[in-house]
Structure formats: structure tokens, C-alpha cells
Amino acid sequence: MNVGLIKARIGSGETPQIWVETELLTPQQIQTSEGNLISEDEIALLRDLAERKRIRQAVSSEDAEPVITLTDGPLDIFYRSTIQGEREQQVQRDISGIDEDLRRRGVLTAGYIDKPGSAMLSRMLAVFQCKRQGLPPDKKTDGLNLSDRFILRDILDQPGERSAIFEAISRGPKKPANSGAVAFFYLNVSGAEDEPCLVRVEFPLWVSESPRLVDALHAVIYREAQVLDSHPYPYLLHRAHELAVVRRIEADEVEAMLQSHLDPQFRARQRQSNKSYLKGLS
Amino acid sequence: MSDSSHSIPIGKLLRADNSQFVAGCRVRELETPAFGSLVRASLVDDTDVYGLITNISINDDGLVRQLVSGVSIPGEYTADNRYNRNLPVEIHVLTIGYQSEGQLRHQLPPRPPLSLDQLFLCGSDEVARFTSLGAGYLRHILRLTDQPIEELLVAHLSQARRVQDSLGNPEWYEDACQRLIVLLRDDYMRLTQVLDALSELE
């Protein structure tokens, strides 16, 4: 599990600091109580947790305010997890501790969702319609389930425009009861007027109580995305991914090292099939 | 092996053959090596391979190409690409001699340097010692076909001349020019170009 972190002082001209931390998960960490391997989503959850822990370590009291942290994906890291039981509760405790610590230090944590496919606005409007018609809010309608990007693409048509702030309400079974409330806005990160590129930026609800912080987050995210303006995406987020990514050749080498540790003759015996070798000649 | 206590390490070998090699270095190390400088790669068997820097190339990749097409690049991200990202600067070196068992020769070495052998910039003492053996090594430079040899000669001879003059050997430079004339006596056009370039040192 590789975690990459990059820390930059915007406007300083200083070389950003970078960290890469690698953890080799033990068999106990990747197996359920029944002895099965945990899913990719659970691995992703553990990696998200590791990222949050590393971010907390990287934030210093000497950092100039506002301090903004940015991760790829929703702020709620449980959205895809099937992790359960004691393991889930431990992760929840860890996340809650990190969130509370960062909030207390005034750190603005944000999640960046590139090309969001959710339809939260559509569902919100459906609930509103149900209420107007005196129907139960969970009454299914025959209305179209339009994506948020589709709804907003002609509204946020100017570069740098952002939407109103929304609060994400999730009552699904995956979201822990004690997890922090999340707000979000949509932002057009495009630099061209006729090519809107909408992304979703999530942040803790407490940030929305300060227009200054919201404006700062808006400005920083847009500026970051414009650095790679032909394909707008926050430069620092791309670099963090670049630091963390494990290339195929690296994964193969680690696997070979592990195999040879278990079996000293592994490298001598390892060979491609003759068919595979000859295919590689073409 | 030469005394490297006063030599500045400037990179590590990437690839090599008997007549040339390429070393990589980080941008921070780029402040030291210069075009035409005399450098040395120290091998594990205590052999030193000497060469002249014929080219310094800075590679790009997809991210750098994206950045250069952007409207503006914050200074901290320029620094990030220069000092954090693993885009090595490549130093191309022409082999012009070697030293083995304490004996210096202006011939190609029996074996090229190996990957990750360290590259050092030669100080004045080494430049003096190497060039005092004579100017015969200039023939290696004249064999180049894809480099501006006039520029390389100017850069290298400028450094070597300074060193030899400081040792009270002003005739060394005249001897080197005479050697070039002899080596290029059958290539008048190239000789003219070389002498024209060297006239800048007068």
C-alpha cells in the first residue's frame, strides 16, 4: 500500500515537500475472520485511512493559514466499503479522531471528484416534488434521474463558477452514524467559456459556515486545476498520485522478491512458457 | 584510482560502450558539469576512464509537456519538476583515455564503465596531468560525426590552456593547435572551421 503526499506553500516559490510511504500488508490484515481475502474496496478504504493519517502528520502548527488538504474522491471514505465488525469500528474511530483533530486545528480538508456521476440534485428535487404533492419523500417517481453535471452544465457555464453549497445527506447502511457532515459545491474548472468541466468539491460542513474559507477553497482549487489547463485537474493531486502509483514493473519485482524469500530457488526456476516467450519476439 | 578527495561527483553512469558513455544526474548537480569539461568515471577495478562532456540533455515527459502549454506555472511547481521529479539530466561523454595501474593512456579503455559507476568532474590537477601527456587524444574528438566538434574543441582547449598556462607551459596550446593541423591536413574545410573557431581564444 503506497501513500504519496506533497505539501506546497502556494505563492512561495519554494520546492514542495514530498513523501512516499509504503506498507506491506500482513496476511492478517488482508484476510477476513473466515480466512477469505478482503475486497479491493476494503484495501482502498485502508489506503484512504492511511492517507488521512499521513495528512494529519504533515500539517504543522507553523503552516500559514488557511491550510487546505486535498484528497482524490469523496470525503466520506466509507461510500464503497463493505468492511464490517470490529475492523469497521476501528476505522471509524480512527477517521473520527483525525477529522476532529484537523477541525480543531482549523485545517480545511477537501475531497475532489473529477467527472462526478452522482445525481444528488435530481434526488433532492424529487424529494421536494414529493413533499409538494404530499407524498412520502421516499416515494419513487417516474422522473428522469439526471446527473448533477447534466443539470448544472448550462448554469455553471463560465470558467471558475461554482454552485451553491449543498449538504450531502446519506442514510445508507455504509455511512457510520458518527461520521462528520459533508458539504459540497460544484465548480467549473474549465478555462474556456464554451467547454464547461464540472467537478465536485466536498468539505466538512463546518467550513460552509465561513464564506471566507469557502471562497479560499474555491479559489485554490480553481487555480490548481488551471496549472494543467488543457486537462484541468489539481496539479498537486496529480503529483500525489504520481508519487503513490506502483508501476507494473515495480509490482512484479516486489512479487519476485517475496517469492524468492519464500523459495530461494524461485528466481532460478521462474521462467516464461515457451509459447509466451516466442510471442514476445513478435 | 585517482585521488577523488578533491573531485566533485556529478552523476552516475546510465549506459556506456568503449568510446562513449552517458551519466545521469539530478538538476541540483547540474550546476557543476559544463560542456567540454574533462570528467572521470572510476571503475571498481581501480581503472579510471576519462572523457569530455559532449552534450548535456534535459529530458521531458508528459507532465512537463502539459505544463509548458499552460498559461502560467507557479514557481513552486517549476521547482517541483526540477528538484522532486525523477527526470535525470543526461551527460554525454566522449571517452578520450584511461588510467590503469598508475599509468595514463590516451587510448580507449579495455572495458567501459558500468551502470551506476560514479562520474567525477576533474579538477585542475587532473586536467594538467591528462593534457601534459600530449595532445594525441584530440583524435578522439575529431572522430565525432554528430556533434559540433569546433565548439567542443574551443570549450575544452580553453580550459586546458588556462591550466597549462598557470603551470608555465604556454607552448602546450601551440602544440595542440599544431596537432590539430596535422590531424586535419587532409580535410581542409574542417580544418578551416576548427581554426576559425579556435581564433576566438586569441
Image (spheres, coloured by chain):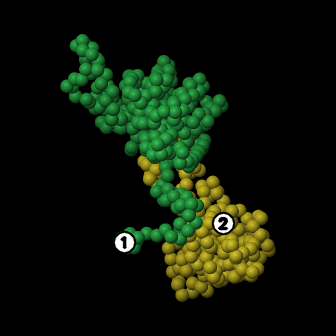
For the residue carrying disc 1, how many other residues have a C-alpha within 10 Å: few (<14), some (14-19), or many (20+)? few
- Are the residues tagged 1 and 2 within 8 Å (C-beta)? no
Which is nearer the eye, B51 or A135? A135
Residue bearing the label numbered 2: B118
- Asked if one can make out residue B54 in the rendered structure from this viewpoint, the answer is no
Is circle 1 on the same chain as circle 2?
Answer: no
> Which residue is depicted at the point 60% across and 57% down?
B26
Residue placed most toward the observer, A57 or A275: A275
Characterize the local packing of mark 2: few (<14), some (14-19) or many (20 or more) Cα atoms within 10 angstroms.
Answer: some
Picture coordinates of residue A248 (x, y %)?
46, 57
User: What residue appears at the point 77 percent right and 64 percent down from the top-left corner?
Assistant: B5
Residue denoted by label 1 = A275
Q: Residue at x 39, y 44 (%)?
A: A230
Against A231, is A273 above or below?
below
Residue at 64 percent across and 33 percent down: it is: A60
Which amino acid, by three-letter code, is at mark 2?
Gln
The residues bearing labels 1 and 2 have C-alpha atoms spaced at a distance of: 41 Å
Residue B89 place in picture, x, y as percent: 56, 60
Q: Is mark 2 on a helix, strand or loop?
A: strand
Q: What element carries label 1?
A: helix
Write down the colour of chain A: green
Chain letter, colour yellow: B
Q: Residue farthest to the right?
A: B168
Does the rendering let one see residue A76?
yes
Mark 1 belongs to which subunit?
A
The N terminus of chain B lies in which quarter of the figure?
Answer: bottom right
Residue type, numbered disc 1: Lys
Q: Foreground mark, 1 or 2?
A: 1
